[in-house]
Image (cartoon, coloured by chain):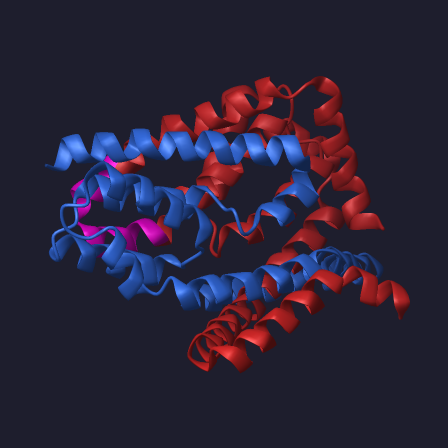
Chain colours: A blue, B red
């Protein structure tokens, strides 16, 4: 549904652009292709790494690590798994909900969700390509530390 | 041809690794191929419009306009614009990087671009709705309220920890990245 509206908006804008200026529109499309091709090699690599990681770290494996009574060890492991994996939200949230039901703590789940979203070890090479080493590493490290803050607060609020 | 192979050598190497895994541990190999395939499909469905937006933005939006909204002197408006643009997004975080690059190219303030990345990573509106249905509104709301200052702080400190020269180099990359 969301993708559909994205395409719709895209076609409308392209149409307007085309009506206003053909040459400029062509330039825009060339630019789009260049930006895409520019990141394609990194992209493809990342996908294979994600595939390999998730083949090993399946939901079943993850729940073994951050399941019941895993304590602070579970929080640390949750943060590490969240950092190295790249799972789309529509899979991650149901997984998190299932983990909660099987007895995992809110803190472990929250740190997993937060690092999953904010920290990207696998996508780091791509981020470095755009932002340079220092900015990318700084952002990811700060996000990693911050995820613990989020997790602790969620743990306090919800339990 | 040679240049092409050089650019894609990491990918080709990883492809080889995956083939080896497929041969030695077929169970994991097949699973990873399946996951890679579905991710590629997801990417191919979301990315084309995103890159067309980037292209259109590059051609139609004047640097001055963009700077007014999110540039060095945009103040609170720039911060809010960055939050809203990031939150309205769709797609995984890596799709945000090329957009961030075009924002830099158009003269957006560095910390605003970082806020955009932060918002894209955690406060995407479609995702929040989904989060609420899976985890309950208290979980979502707590995370959301803590994340907002968090995103701003991460952006602020990342900018502070970089020198002016280092930031200039990043702006330089954003120009060469779309023009080479």
Question: In the figure, B5 relative to A78: above or below?
Answer: below
Answer whether residue A16 is magenta in the image: no
* Residue under the point 52% across and 71% down: B36
Give the residue at x 12% y 52%.
A103
Residue at the location (44% across, 76% down)? B31
Task: Point out residue A96 in the picture as x, y percentages from the top left corner.
Answer: 24, 55
Q: Disc count in the image?
A: 0
Figure quadrant of residue B163: top right
Residue B24 horizontal/vertical position (percent): 52, 79
Q: On the image, which quarter does residue A25 sit in?
A: bottom right
The answer to whether residue B130 is magenta is yes
Relative to B109, does residue A128 appear above or below in the rendering? below
Residue B6 falls in which quadrant of the image?
bottom right
Q: Residue at x 45, y 39 (%)?
A: B119
Q: In the drawing, does residue B130 fall left or right of residue B152? A: left
Q: Is residue A141 visible?
A: yes
Q: Is residue A4 above or below residue B170?
A: below
| Dominant secondary structure (helix, strand or loop) of the stretch shown in magenta | helix
Does residue B82 appear anywhere in the picture? Answer: no
Q: What is the residue that sits farthest to the right in this orientation?
A: B2
Please state which of residues B172 and A120 is positioned toward the viewer in this rendering: A120
User: Looking at the figure, which quarter contains the N terminus of chain B?
Assistant: bottom right
Residue A18 left/right relative to A93: right
Residue range highlighted in magenta? B127-142
Q: Is residue A92 left or right of residue B10?
A: left
In the rendered image, the vertical position of residue A81 relative to residue B153, given as above or below? below
**Residue B60, image x, y percentages:** 73, 48
Identify the residue at the far front of this view.
Answer: B24
A30 and A95: which is toward the camera: A95
Q: Indicate the position of residue B146 as horizontal and vertical percent values.
A: 30, 30
């Amino acid at each position: 549904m969301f993708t559909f509206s994205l395409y719709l908006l895209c076609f409308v804008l392209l149409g307007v652009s085309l009506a206003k200026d053909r040459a400029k529109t062509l330039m825009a499309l060339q630019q789009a292709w260049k930006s895409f091709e520019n990141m394609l090699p990194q992209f493809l690599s990342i996908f294979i790494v994600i595939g390999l990681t998730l083949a090993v770290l399946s939901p079943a494996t993850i729940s073994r690590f951050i399941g019941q009574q895993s304590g602070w060890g579970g929080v640390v492991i949750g943060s590490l798994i969240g950092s190295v994996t790249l799972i789309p939200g529509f899979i991650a949230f149901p997984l998190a909900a299932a983990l909660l039901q099987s007895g995992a703590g809110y803190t472990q789940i929250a740190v997993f969700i937060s690092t999953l979203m904010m920290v990207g070890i696998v996508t780091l090479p791509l981020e470095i390509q755009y932002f340079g080493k220092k900015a990318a590493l700084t952002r990811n490290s700060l996000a990693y530390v911050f995820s613990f803050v989020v997790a602790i607060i969620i743990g306090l609020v919800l339990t | 041809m040679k240049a092409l192979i050089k650019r894609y050598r990491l990918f080709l190497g990883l492809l080889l690794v995956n083939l080896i895994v497929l041969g030695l541990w077929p169970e994991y190999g097949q699973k990873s191929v399946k996951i890679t395939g579905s991710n590629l499909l997801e990417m191919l469905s979301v990315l084309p419009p995103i890159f067309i937006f980037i292209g259109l933005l590059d051609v139609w939006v004047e640097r001055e306009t963009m700077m007014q909204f999110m540039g060095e002197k945009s103040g609170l408006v720039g911060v809010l614009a960055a939050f809203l643009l990031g939150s309205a997004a769709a797609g995984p975080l890596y799709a945000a990087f090329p957009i961030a690059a075009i924002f830099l190219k158009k003269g957006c303030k560095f910390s605003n671009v970082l806020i955009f990345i932060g918002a894209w990573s955690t406060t995407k509106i479609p995702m929040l709705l989904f989060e609420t249905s899976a985890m309950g509104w208290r979980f979502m709301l707590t995370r959301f309220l803590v994340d907002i200052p968090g995103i701003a702080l991460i952006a602020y400190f990342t900018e502070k920890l970089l020198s002016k020269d280092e930031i200039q180099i990043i702006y330089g990359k954003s120009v060469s990245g779309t023009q080479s």
